[in-house]
């Protein structure tokens, strides 16, 4: 008896799998950022100065477990957002493809820098709050981590990169007509509304527009793998 031959795994199948995995990064980013920001205690998501550190350490100590968890979720969410810019760029063909490629590179860098910034702002704060040391020493370490040139470079790359990547992605989607133009606008506005959203439950309604946009874009990316060829 001859063995039954299994279907061969073609290059197109491999490409479809890669695109689908990239498409999943968008809803993952939306969910992680929504939950992470909602769980973060109010006011504990800003760069830390000496005055702020003295106010925030007692709050962080009272909610250290929650702060550790929320910041870890946000860090992974920003990582997924970095991948999302790459995934969205795959929607663009023809007009706007060069812009989309630049947006993907800038967006990936911005997401990576954002994850490091969140680590320095929130995760370090949670660690300092539970450290067995004096408050003066904790404040000194936190301010040093949040006021060095390294932090400034990461913070600027994160904010400026996110703005540039978002605008370029919106332009690329608009020019290529890869998605309805309302979705291009919703993506840009969604990021603009969600980026400055304060930590806590108030962030949930402010993040809904970008959540809807990412889910719609993810569906569009997934649908490209259903086409024959």
Image: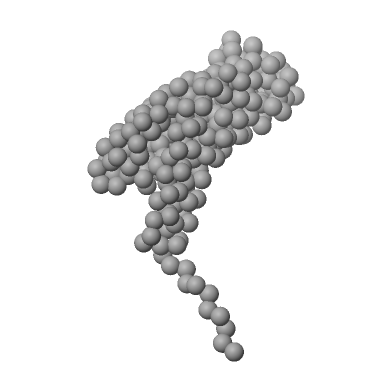
x then y, percent, for residue 143: 56, 19
* Snapshot colouring: one colour
- Residue at x 35%, y 36% (from the top left corner): 180
Q: What quarter of the picture does the C terminus occupy?
A: bottom left
Which corner quadrant of the image does residue 88 belong to?
top left
- Residue at x 44%, y 27% (from the top left corner): 190
Q: Nearer the viewer, residue 67 or 183?
A: 183
Q: Is residue 93 visible?
A: yes
x then y, percent, for residue 28: 55, 40
- Residue at x 57%, y 35% (from the top left corner): 31
Residue 110, compared with residue 225, is above or below; it is above
Which corner quadrant of the image does residue 62 belong to?
top right
Q: Nearer the viewer, residue 7 or 46?
A: 7
Residue 46, compared with residue 176, is above or below; it is above
Residue 34, compared with residue 178, is above or below; it is above
Horizontally, residue 173 falls left or right of residue 117, namely left
Residue most extreme to the bottom:
1
Q: Nearer the viewer, residue 192 or 140?
A: 192
């Amino acid at each position: 008896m001859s063995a039954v031959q299994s279907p061969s795994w073609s290059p197109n199948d491999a490409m479809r799998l890669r695109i689908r995995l990239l498409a999943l990064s968008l809803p993952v980013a939306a969910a992680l950022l929504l939950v992470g920001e909602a769980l973060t205690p109010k006011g504990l998501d800003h760069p830390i100065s000496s005055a702020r550190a003295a106010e925030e350490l007692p709050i962080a100590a009272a909610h250290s477990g929650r702060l550790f968890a929320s910041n870890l979720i946000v860090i992974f969410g920003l990582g997924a957002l970095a991948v999302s810019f790459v995934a969205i760029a795959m929607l663009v063909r023809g007009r706007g493809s060069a812009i989309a490629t630049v947006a993907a590179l800038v967006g990936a860098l911005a997401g990576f820098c954002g994850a490091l910034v969140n680590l320095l702002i929130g995760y370090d704060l949670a660690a300092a709050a539970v450290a067995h040391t004096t408050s003066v020493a904790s404040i000194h370490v936190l301010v040093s981590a949040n006021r060095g040139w390294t932090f400034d470079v990461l913070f600027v790359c994160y904010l400026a990169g996110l703005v540039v990547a978002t605008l370029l992605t919106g332009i690329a989607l608009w020019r290529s007509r890869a998605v309805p133009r309302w979705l291009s606008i919703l993506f840009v506005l969604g990021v603009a509304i969600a980026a400055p959203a304060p930590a806590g439950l108030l962030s949930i309604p402010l993040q809904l527009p970008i959540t809807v946009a990412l889910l719609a874009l993810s569906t569009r990316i997934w649908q490209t793998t259903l086409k024959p060829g």
